Structure formats: C-alpha cells, structure tokens
Amino acid sequence: MDKVGIVGYNQVKCYSDANYGRYEMIFEAVRGAIDNAGLKKKDITTVISATNDYYDGRTISNCFTVEVGGGYMADESKVEMDGAHAMLYGLMRILSGNHKLAVIWGGSMPSCYPYHSARLYETDPTWERPNAYVNDITSSGFQMRAYMEKYGLSKEDIAKVAVKNKKNAAKNPLALEESQNPNISISDVLEAEIYADPVTELMVAPPCDSVAAVLLAPERQAVKITDKPVWITGVGWNQETYYLGERDLSQSTSMEHAAKAAYDMAGISNPRNDLDVAELFEVCAHEELIFTEALGLVEKGKGPQLNTEINGDFPINPSGGALGGNPPCATGLIRIIEAVKQIRGEAGQYQVGDVKRAVASGQIGMCAQNNILYVLEGEN
Amino acid sequence: MSEKIIEKNKGLVKADFGFWVGLYMDKFYDTFEQKKIIGNKCQECGAVFVPPRNICGICNIKLPLDQNWIDVSDEGILINYTRTAYKVTDRRARKAKKLNDIGMVQLEGSDTAIVYPLIDFKEDDLKTGMKVKVKWKDNPTGGPSDIEGFIKG
C-alpha cells in the first residue's frame, strides 16, 4: 500500500449536553483540524463524514453539513457507520491517486434524542423490533454474561476495566466530565444502577455530544504539511452475522479477522511485542477484554490478567477509551486520534512512554457486529 | 437567554413503515396461530434456523421455500439472560416498575437462539442451561407477540 499519512486532527470536548448548535460543533472540529495543520479551505479536495440519519433526525443528514464540514464545492460523501469506517473511505480516496487532502469527520449530539432507543431501529423490523427486547444495552448484558460464564470470570474482573478507564479519563481534558473520576472504586462500579445485569451504568460507554476530525494526505503532501506525520501501515475490517442467537458472544470473531488482516499488512507477527499501545472502542467494559484477546495480546479468557494501565505491561485506552465518552459516529475516530497523539508524544498526562506503533479500533452494530482496526506508525 | 428547543414537525408528516414480512416469515407466523413453531434447514450445512431464513448466510445459498421445513419444539434451553430495570424503548424516561428478565432461548431442534421475556422467574432461579418452554398468548393472531415469553420447562 502507498504511504498515506494522518497530518492533522481535532476533537471537540465531550459534553452530556453541549452548549452548541450541532453545525457549530462540526465547524469547530473541522476548521480546527485545518488551522492546526496550517492549511486552508482550498487545500481540501475530498470530505467524508460519519453521521446517522436516525441520530440526526433527518434523512440524508450530510446535506446540511456540507459547508461546516469543509465540503463546499469539494468532492463529498458520507458513511453511515463509525468515524473509523469513514476514514477507510477517505483512505481509499487518497489511494485512488486523485486527492491531496481528505477531511474525515464524524459525530453526533445524543443530548437531542434518546440514543439507546434509537438503537432499537437497528433490529429486524419483521421479528425483533415489534416486541422491543433487544437494543445495545440488553445485548451487552448477554455479551457480558456469555464472556464471564465461558471463562469463569467475575463481575470484579470486568469492573476493573471501568475503574481503569474512568481514572484514565480524568487525565484527558477532552473526556466527558461525568466520566472523569480519579477516585472511583470497583464497588462504585458494581453498585451503580443496573442497566442490563450484569452490566451496570458505570460499565457502559456514556453517549455524549462531540465531533472529531482527521486529515489524511498522500506521502508527498504529508511530509510537506507536517514533520510529524503518522502513517497508516495496516487496516483490516470484518463483519459477523446480524442475529445475536447465531453468534458466540464470548469472543469477537470479526475483530480476530480484522486484526489478522491489519497485522499481515503491517508485517506484525507478535502483537504484544510489536505494538506499544492500543486505543479500542469498547461499548462496555467487558468488550475491551474481549478485544484484547481478539487482538492476540493475551490468550482467550486471560484478558483480566493483563496489566493495561498507562504504566502497565501493555497500555490499553490510556485516554479513557469510549468509557470516557461515546459520541456516536465519532468514537472510533477519536480512538485513532488518541493513537496519533501517543505516537506524536502529544498525549499530555496520559502519554505512554515512547510509542512507535499503535493500534486503534472502531465498531458498529449490536455486540460489535462489525469491527475495524488500524495499525499506525511514526516516522521511523 | 432562554433555551429554545424545536421539536420535530409534530403532526405535519406521518410516514410510518408497513413492513411486509416476506414469504418465509409469513409461513412461520401462520403456524403461530396453531401455537406451533417451524424453522428451515440449510440443505448444505444442515443448520436449522428459527425464525426461518431465505438464505443461509454462511453457505451463501438460497433456501427453497417449498422444502426443508422442520417442526421445532416449543421447549428449549436458556443459553443467556439479562435483567434490566428499563424499558428498551426509552431508557431515559421510562423506568420499569420491576426488573424485566429477558432470555436467549435455543428451541429443541433449532441451531439458533431467540430473544423473549422470561416470565415469573426469581433471580436465584435463573441459570443458563435450564429448560424453559414457550408461554403462548391465549388467542394467537400470527405475529411475533403470540409468544408472550418463556416459563420454566
């Protein structure tokens, strides 16, 4: 694959009820990324966004975001998935050889709508939707139980992930304020309100308002724009069947396949040694452990045994991950931005030593039906 | 400064969907009227699907409409469950009066699991692997809510 570099990024802080109209928020994210990179509107040749018509409350929701997303009189398109999938589309546009600068942005404002109810609209309208027993939360309850029972794990094993991520989020100024808790304990997590047993409120990535943007450029332009480009050296994505009743929810087969494809492309044979940090989109605390295993960082069922703190054996989600704030359609893109910050040494209080190579993931669907994984590397 | 919130155009447009369930699900729901459950079997891998599918996703082949229908028991095994304090349709406002138990059940003779409420279980009763059976509505009409849920088998 030709070299494609991430040459800029910007994220609006996560808010539970942002004091913005949504177009102001998109403009701030995209214009900020362009300004930070020292670029101008005329440099943008293609814009790919990630939004969702249900979350935006209108059809063809990108028709209103053309100007604020920098897409006026540019080649523009939309991906109705995670922001990490929009970056895949942007990557392909750059690889086509026809573009010099791609803007990728994604985001939403769930303060305007009941997010978990909107997730019901993902279910089969001829079978599951009329009775409304399945949404992102109840399916996460199934997923956590399947994982715990398969490997004999405890609720405490899962709660530890929530504690780590909320403590990490306290060091991340862009995380959701309500998720930043340096003093949280395992019992706080276990005693929080039941969402869908065994999942409690504090194990769930909280939907919030935010928009994120990333800039991509081919090698020739990338090295002119910045002296710290971050290269996309591997990408893999994969999808499982829709029906929960056909899947083994104790593992993430699609993430295993996505990781194999991304690792093969990047020449990674031993992920635990070859990678320095991972930023993963976990909808619930237990999902981070399932992904850790799918990425080959530990054996299946051993996720809780790996020390994934910022100074641990293999840091995962030093930014706080999605548990630090989950703005729909932006969350995967934010994971990519956080991995870029780690590689460029720009992660401030949650910087993980010297990072040469990182992975970042996005996902979409019930129990992470579809996963996408990027391998990102610095100049060396 | 007041917070001005515009709600969507209430009453101006009504565009509800009427999904036709398709030939396979039509046949499936018809049998609900007799309080019976059927699935269909992939002619290649042998998997039995409940509800029926028009294709096998793994083999990527069409399953014939007129063949390989299998009578499935209305008893099965609880393979997973969750207890939730909310109504799935509105987590913000509508908290349920009591915890709802929702289960994934694999009916005997089927290779897939379906999701329905678990009726009249106490928390300590619930165990994956236990036997459960369908509680039918008194007067089924051929739709997904003919199955009220699952009770102890």
Image (cartoon, rainbow, N blue to C red):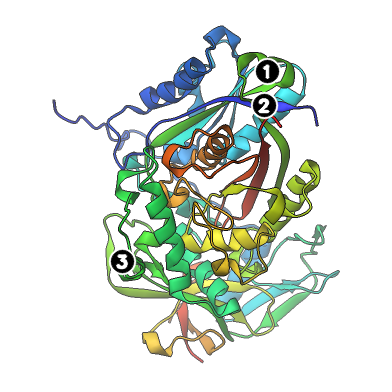
* Mark pair 2, 3: CA separation: 42 Å
Q: Quadrant of the N terminus of chain A?
A: top right
First in sequence, mark 3 or 1: give its number.
3
Q: Report which quarter residue A15 is drawn in.
A: top left
Q: Residue at x 44, y 37 (%)?
A: A348
Asked if the residue at tag 3 contacts the one at tag 2, i.e. Cβ–Cβ closer than 8 Å, the answer is: no
* Tag shown at residue A188: 3
Q: Callout 1: few (<14), some (14-19), or many (20+) C-alpha neighbours within 10 Å?
A: some
- Identified by mark 2, the residue type is Gly
Asked if the residue at tag 1 contacts the one at tag 2, i.e. Cβ–Cβ closer than 8 Å, the answer is: yes
Task: Give the camera-side residue of B35 and A28.
Answer: A28
State whether residue B93 is above or below residue A233.
below
Residue A201 in view (yes/no): yes
Give the residue at mark 1. Answer: A223
- Identified by mark 3, the residue type is Asp
State whether residue B92 is above or below residue A71.
below
Q: Name the residue at the left extreme.
A: B1
Q: Please state which of the two labelled residues, at mark 3 or mark 1, is closer to the viewer.
A: 1
- Where residue A307 appears, as percent x and y from the top left, is 54, 62
